[in-house]
Image (spheres, rainbow, N blue to C red):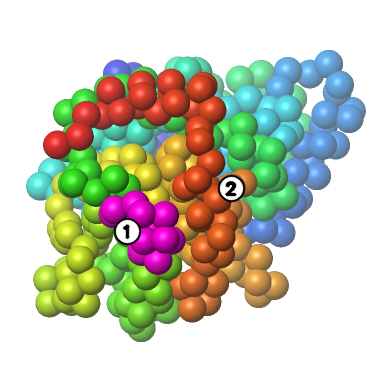
Amino acid sequence: MLIVLGLNGFGLKERQIKRHRLVKIKKGLGEPELRQVLAAIRAHQAAHPAAAPISITCLGRHDGAGAQALGIISALLWAEATGGRYLHTPFAVMAHAVGVTREEWAARWERFLNLGHGERRVPRRARIIPARDPLTKPETLAKPGTVLAAPYFHWREFQTPDALERLRPLLRRKYYSRSKSGVRLHRGSGSLMVAIHVRRGDITEGRRKFYTHNDLVMNAIEGVRAVARDLGRTLHLNLFSEGPEEMFAPFAAAGCTLHLDRDPFEAFHNLVSADILVQAKSSFSYLAGMISTGIVLHERYATNAAGEPFYRHAPGWIMRDETGAFDRDALRQRLLSPPSSASRAKNGLLRWLSPGS
């Protein structure tokens, strides 16, 4: 038997999972297998229409906060689309730890993002099995206490505009259910706070799948500048990344305030809180955009052979093209459109929970 690391840190008793099952869970599911699992679930539901909803959970990941959070988001979307039930397993081990163990880093992000808020935890006596098991043993779906586990349940067909639009307020409620008043915001003196995420650190120009050249980011910044200038609005440009200052000299020369190798929790909250967020090819800033109530300039990434993105953009996001440019008229209209009274009240509450510096 093998004890899943990190669960004790969240107030749960040790839960044991057989080693061979944990190995299968960590392996993950490719698109063909996910399609087969979905077919097995549909067949079970058709044969047993009065059966309890099928429970799923995410576990077995060791990568960064954004990637692990998107795994949970994929499970929430899957559960909604299939009539299932999402059960929460807290982050256990996480990459990119700074000054603490990977287990403590996971615990910090669990508390900060708070994705388990309002969700049932996996019961102590649950029968946790790899999500692929029903492919060879369909009868497992009928056994009481069964929970299907996988590192992620990414299925593009469930990332519909309506589903993503329903999900975003849920993510905001989870996120802001823990006060962010202690997190510093870098608003500056400009009337619009712009947050620019440039993915470097673990990503180099040789890894082009997740790399965006400086020129493309500069094109996006210039587009934002031009629209703001036309509207008589001033900007405060914050750039968040990792690496030596000389790597970002063109951005500093363009008036960006550099926030390099800083507290990632502070960086994330500034991305969330920006009036305009310029995303990178990154689950970190994708997640921030999902929580944000601001304007999001999105860059497609992680596409498959057919050119379909792994993560679809949310409704209302403004798309950047392969040069970094975007529809400036769309940004202009968004900046000119007054928010609804409900939106003003919500934004006021969020700013009260996250006072600026």
Q: SS for tag 2?
A: loop
Is 234 magenta? The answer is yes
Give the mark count: 2
Say the numbered circle drawn on residue 196. 1
> Which residue type does callout 2 highlight?
Gly
Expressed as whole percent of the image width and height from the top left, the position of residue 55 reads 62, 27
Of residues 253 and 128, the one nearer the viewer is 253
Say the numbered circle drawn on residue 118. none
Q: Residue at x 34, y 52 (%)?
A: 233
Of residues 103 and 13, the one nearer the viewer is 103
Is 244 magenta? The answer is no
Q: Which quadrant of the figure contains the N terminus? A: top left
> Which residue type does callout 1 highlight?
Ile
Q: Earlier in the sequence, mark 1 or mark 2?
A: 1
Say the numbered circle drawn on residue 316. 2
Of residues 230 and 298, the one nearer the viewer is 230
Give the magenta-colored segment's residue range. Answer: 224-235
Expressed as whole percent of the image width and height from the top left, the position of residue 254 reads 23, 71
| Distance between the alpha carbons at the discs numbered 1 and 2 | 18 Å
